Image (spheres, rainbow, N blue to C red):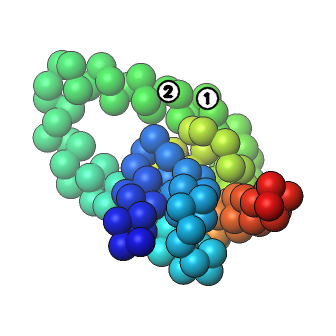
């Protein structure tokens, strides 16, 4: 069981799944439904400070490398296209709603990049991302729980 919790946590901090994958994984593996929600949510929240540290402290050094710079510009353009008008228009609430939608490309990684690109204050960005992650996790958790009840 501890292995399943660790894998659910790893999915929750991964940019390829976040809690949107970690929660269903843990629940389907038989981990306590409340425990899996809490650990996956907290693991996903941890991504924001790590991303902000990376974007503020390390990103500037890496931009000197052509290949990294090209990739970073591509990701920045995608983030601005996907979230730009909503976040510029609605600010905090736009960012919260963007992170809340449980679809690929709309989680805390994109929310952190948007916080950085649109120069949103870190505390405000952290709060918007955390609430968005919580609501997204809740949607995924309830949906998975109802689906599992229907299967049994």
Up-down relation of residue 33 to residue 24 (above or below): below
Give the number of callouts.
2
Residue 53: quarter of image: bottom left
Density class for disc 1 (Cα within 10 Å; few <14, some 14-19, many ≥20) is few
Taking the spot 54% from the left edge, 56% from the top edge, the residue there is 25
Q: Is residue 123 left or right of residue 95?
A: left
Q: Which quadrant of the rendered structure holds the C terminus?
A: bottom right
Q: CA distance from mark 2 to mark 1?
A: 6 Å
Expressed as whole percent of the image width and height from the top left, the position of residue 94 reads: 71, 53
Q: Which mark is residue 77?
A: 2
Expressed as whole percent of the image width and height from the top left, the position of residue 9 reads: 41, 64
**Residue 28 visible within the image:** yes
Depth check, front residue: 150 or 59: 150
Expressed as whole percent of the image width and height from the top left, the position of residue 29 reads: 53, 61
Q: Are marks 2 and 1 in contact (CB under 8 Å)?
A: yes
Up-down relation of residue 90 to residue 106 (above or below): below
Q: Which residue is mark 1?
A: 81
Depth check, front residue: 55 or 102: 102
């Amino acid at each position: 069981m501890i292995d399943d919790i660790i894998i659910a946590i790893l999915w929750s901090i991964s940019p390829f799944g976040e809690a949107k994958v970690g929660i269903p994984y843990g629940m389907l593996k038989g981990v306590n439904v409340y425990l899996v929600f809490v650990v996956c949510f907290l693991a996903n929240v941890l991504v924001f400070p790590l991303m902000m540290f990376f974007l503020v402290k390390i990103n500037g050094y890496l931009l000197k490398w052509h290949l990294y710079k090209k990739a970073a510009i591509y990701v920045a353009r995608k983030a601005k296209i996907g979230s730009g008008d909503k976040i510029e228009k609605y600010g905090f609430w736009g960012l919260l709603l963007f992170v809340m939608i449980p679809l690929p490309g709309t989680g805390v990684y994109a929310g952190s990049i948007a916080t950085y690109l649109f120069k949103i204050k870190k505390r405000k960005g952290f709060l918007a991302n955390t609430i968005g992650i919580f609501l997204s996790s809740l949607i995924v958790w309830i949906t998975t729980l109802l689906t599992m009840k229907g299967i049994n």
